């Protein structure tokens, strides 16, 4: 019986200072709410990145199938390599724009 009495009177490791239930912190819901918000932010970030990747792939596919876009890309690459000068670059782009 003395062991039971000792267990009932000892405050335990959760309440070392005594005082009773009135000393319990009132901010304990902050942890589960923060944990939930963290996982919502992770899910939103993953959704954003996947959506952005899908839009980028669709844009690249559409641009690759357009012959004028391919022609502009070739002209830009030739200008970047120095095969044509700036005047010729602008003349070729304007010719592609009006055809």
Image: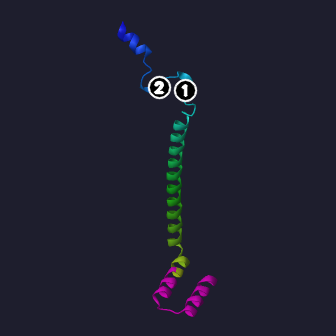
- Residue at position x 49%, y 55% from top? 50
Question: Is residue 80 highlighted in magenta?
Answer: yes
Q: Indicate the position of residue 4 as horizontal and vertical percent values.
A: 38, 10
Give the labeled residue for mark 2.
Answer: 15
Looking at the rendering, which quadrant does residue 95 occupy? bottom right
CB atoms of marks 1 and 2 within 8 Å:
yes
Give the labeled residue for mark 1.
Answer: 23
For the magenta stretch, what is the residue range? 73-99
User: Callout 2: helix, strand or loop?
Assistant: helix
Residue 5 badge: none
Q: Indicate the position of residue 25 as horizontal and vertical percent values.
A: 55, 31
Q: Which is more toward the observer, 40 or 61?
A: 40
Is 42 situated above or below 84? above
Question: Is residue 86 highlighted in magenta?
Answer: yes
Is 2 situated above or below 85? above
Residue 29 as seen in the image, left or right of residue 12: right
* Viewport quadrant of the C terminus: bottom right
User: Callout 1: helix, strand or loop?
Assistant: helix
Q: Indicate the position of residue 17 as horizontal and vertical percent values.
A: 48, 26
Q: Indicate the position of residue 59 as horizontal and vertical percent values.
A: 54, 66
Is 12 situated above or below 4? below
Distance (Cα) linking label 1 and label 2: 9 Å
- Residue at position x 35%, y 11% from top? 3
Residue 80 as seen in the image, left or right of residue 6: right
- Residue at position x 56%, y 92% from top? 88
């Amino acid at each position: 019986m003395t062991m039971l009495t000792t267990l009932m009177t000892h405050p335990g490791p959760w309440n070392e200072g005594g005082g009773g239930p009135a000393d319990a912190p009132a901010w304990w819901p902050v942890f589960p709410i923060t944990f939930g918000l963290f996982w919502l932010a992770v899910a939103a970030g993953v959704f954003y990145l996947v959506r952005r990747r899908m839009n980028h792939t669709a844009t690249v596919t559409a641009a690759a199938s357009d012959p004028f876009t391919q022609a502009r890309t070739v002209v830009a690459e030739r200008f970047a390599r120095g095969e044509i000068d700036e005047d010729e670059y602008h003349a070729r782009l304007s010719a592609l724009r009006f055809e």
